[in-house]
């Protein structure tokens, strides 16, 4: 057993300080279930100190030039690069994602996000003219950032990088479930020499310090990523001070396969898009919507594809599927699998039992249900585990109706032999990003949800603009 690392201080006003809050959260290794670290359970007083530091730092930071800010962001990106092996190992252990994927995605994307933010500053026009008005874009002020555990550093970077680029100061409250990467980022930011108070880190329980941050009268904007449940609460408490609220929430994303698609490719790709990060992906394509007359063929391809996702230890070997993040998450997912069985969905592969030989670690078998219908719980609820629902349709209109039959609207996929047909169906799906015939993820493209999947957009220019106010000077 490796040692337990105690992170016992918070990063406030450019210093590592002792927390006012007492107690710690234990962070577990998702494969061994052992405690690997502890982090402070901050208190409301810690949030107050961090917000005061961010407030005090705002005038000078917001007055820096684009070049100065780009320089700091580039340094942070380089710092992430230098510590990328350590970060990938940390996140593979905290979250359970296989190491090679963690390296590529969990560390690669944050590096890119800081790099992109620095580059955007080069080209972005902060001032434009409309008739006799000069329209200027200015930083919002103090930003409270609250983030989840599934892509922990990526979600942080999607907020912190553009917020700093825009000239805001930040108080970050990461998830207690996978917080170690946030401490490493704070060390990198400290080493980059960012002025005191521009970036602050406070860990603590969401309903305590998260709410205090969202409600704080000196916080001008709260940017939240997490569950729709907590996002609603953040909006509620933020509303008392009418601050700007950005929300990136859950999803139950459809993957519509039309009858002229390449089924071998579309179905296998869809299984992978559902199982990435053990299904703990907000954009996971969890509802595969397929022509009823091709159902048997789809089932066969899907089961064969799932067989390639045999779960294994995330840092040993090259499996595509590791454990889930925690025992709470594992039990939640097993509960949904049992509900699927009880409600009459056809279980093609997987199930509630632990995978063979993996009794230790938060593993769940890659699972596929077929003949899933809209009245079933597994059609509606975000499971956040490796569980795919195959849903048959009779007509293209019905396929679109099924795709949109959800409170969510984060993502989706469409496959067709005819690219124009695929694009036409993609336009009919009410969601923020749709993969057309497996189109690749784009770090510059706007990312965010329709309906109860959120408010606002992250990434690229749209992500930068989230953190800007607009002022008109009538000349
Ligand atoms: P949670 O909503 O439980 O937690 C997210 C963050 O919010 C954590 O930092 C948590 O703190 C904090 N929090 C919890 N309750 C409150 C509250 N009342 N007030 C303020 N903050 C609070 O989500 P998970 O961490 O479980 O993440 C999974 C969810 O996130 C899924 O639903 C997923 O779809 C969604 N998600 C959405 C993404 C998107 O971009 N749309 C991207 C990634 C995930 P703590 O954990 O420390 O208690």
Image (cartoon, rainbow, N blue to C red):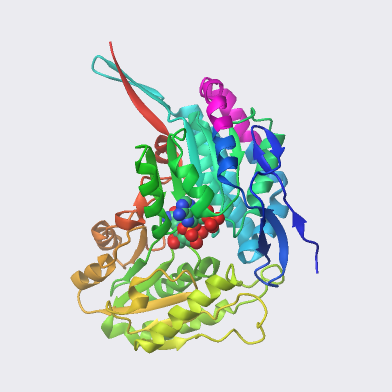
Vertical placement of 42 versus 49: above or below?
Answer: below
Which residue is drawn at the image coordinates 37% and 85% (left, top)?
A: 297
Vertical placement of 285 versus 221: above or below?
Answer: below
Vertical placement of 383 versus 108: above or below?
Answer: below
Q: Where is residue 426? Give x, y as percent.
A: 28, 59
Decide whether residue 56 is among the magenta residues. Answer: yes
Task: Place residue 36 in its image quadrant.
Answer: bottom right
Q: Is residue 315 left or right of residue 69?
A: right
Q: In this view, does 95 lie to the left or right of 449?
A: right
Looking at the figure, which quarter contains the C terminus?
top left
Looking at the figure, which quarter contains the N terminus?
bottom right
Identify which residue, 44 or 287, lies in the foreground: 44
Q: Is the magenta stretch mostly helix, strand or loop?
A: helix
Task: Place residue 403 in its image quadrant.
Answer: bottom left
Identify which residue, 27 or 157, lies in the foreground: 27
Q: Where is residue 352? Give x, y as percent.
A: 51, 85
Which residue is drawn at the image coordinates 55% and 37% (left, top)?
A: 48
Decide whether residue 471 is among the magenta residues. Answer: no
Which residue is drawn at the image coordinates 29% and 73% (left, top)?
A: 260
**Which residues make up the magenta segment?**
52-75
Q: Where is residue 445? Give x, y as percent.
A: 41, 46
């Amino acid at each position: 057993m490796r040692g337990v690392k105690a992170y016992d201080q918070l990063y406030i006003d450019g210093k590592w300080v002792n927390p006012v809050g007492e107690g710690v959260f234990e962070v577990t290794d998702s494969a061994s279930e052992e405690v690997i670290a502890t982090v402070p359970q901050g208190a409301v007083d810690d949030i107050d100190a961090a917000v005061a530091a961010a407030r005090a730092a705002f005038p000078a930071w917001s007055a820096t030039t684009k070049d100065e800010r780009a320089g700091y962001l580039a340094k942070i990106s380089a710092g992430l690069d230098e510590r990328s092996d350590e970060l990938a190992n940390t996140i593979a252990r905290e979250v359970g994602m296989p190491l090679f994927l963690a390296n590529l995605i969990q560390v690669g994307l944050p590096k890119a996000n800081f790099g992109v933010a620095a580059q955007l500053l080069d080209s972005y026009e902060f001032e434009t003219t409309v008739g006799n008005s000069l329209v200027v874009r200015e930083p919002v002020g103090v930003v409270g950032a609250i983030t989840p555990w599934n892509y922990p550093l990526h979600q942080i970077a999607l907020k912190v990088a553009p917020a700093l680029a825009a000239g805001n100061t930040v108080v970050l409250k990461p998830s207690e479930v996978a917080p170690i990467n946030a401490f490493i980022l704070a060390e990198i930011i400290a080493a980059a020499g960012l002025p005191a108070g521009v970036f602050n880190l406070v860990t603590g329980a969401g309903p305590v310090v998260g709410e205090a941050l969202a409600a704080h009268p000196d916080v001008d904007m709260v940017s939240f990523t997490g569950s729709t449940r907590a996002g609603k609460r953040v909006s509620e408490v933020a509303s008392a001070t009418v601050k700007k609220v950005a929300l990136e929430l859950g999803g139950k994303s459809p993957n519509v396969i039309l009858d002229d698609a390449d089924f071998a490719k579309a179905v296998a790709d869809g299984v992978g898009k559902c199982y990435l990060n053990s299904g703990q992906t907000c954009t996971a394509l969890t509802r595969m919507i397929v022509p009823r007359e091709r159902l048997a063929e789809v089932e066969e391809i899907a089961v064969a594809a799932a067989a390639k996702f045999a779960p294994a230890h995330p840092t040993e070997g090259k499996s595509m599927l590791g454990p889930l993040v925690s025992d709470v998450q594992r039990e939640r997912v097993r509960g949904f699998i049992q509900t699927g069985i009880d409600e009459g969905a056809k279980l093609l592969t997987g199930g509630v039992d632990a995978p063979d030989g993996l009794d230790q670690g938060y593993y769940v078998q890659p699972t596929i249900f077929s003949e899933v219908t809209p009245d079933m719980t597994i059609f509606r609820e975000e499971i956040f585990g490796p569980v795919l629902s195959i849903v048959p349709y009779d007509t293209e209109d019905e396929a679109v109706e099924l795709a949109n039959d959800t409170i969510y609207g984060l993502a989706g996929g469409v496959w067709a032999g005819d690219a124009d047909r695929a694009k036409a169906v993609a336009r009919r799906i009410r969601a923020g990003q749709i993969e057309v015939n497996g189109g690749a993820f784009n770090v510059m493209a706007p990312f965010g949800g329709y309906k109860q999947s959120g408010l606002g957009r992250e990434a690229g220019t749209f992500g930068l603009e989230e953190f800007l106010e607009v002022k008109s000077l009538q000349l």
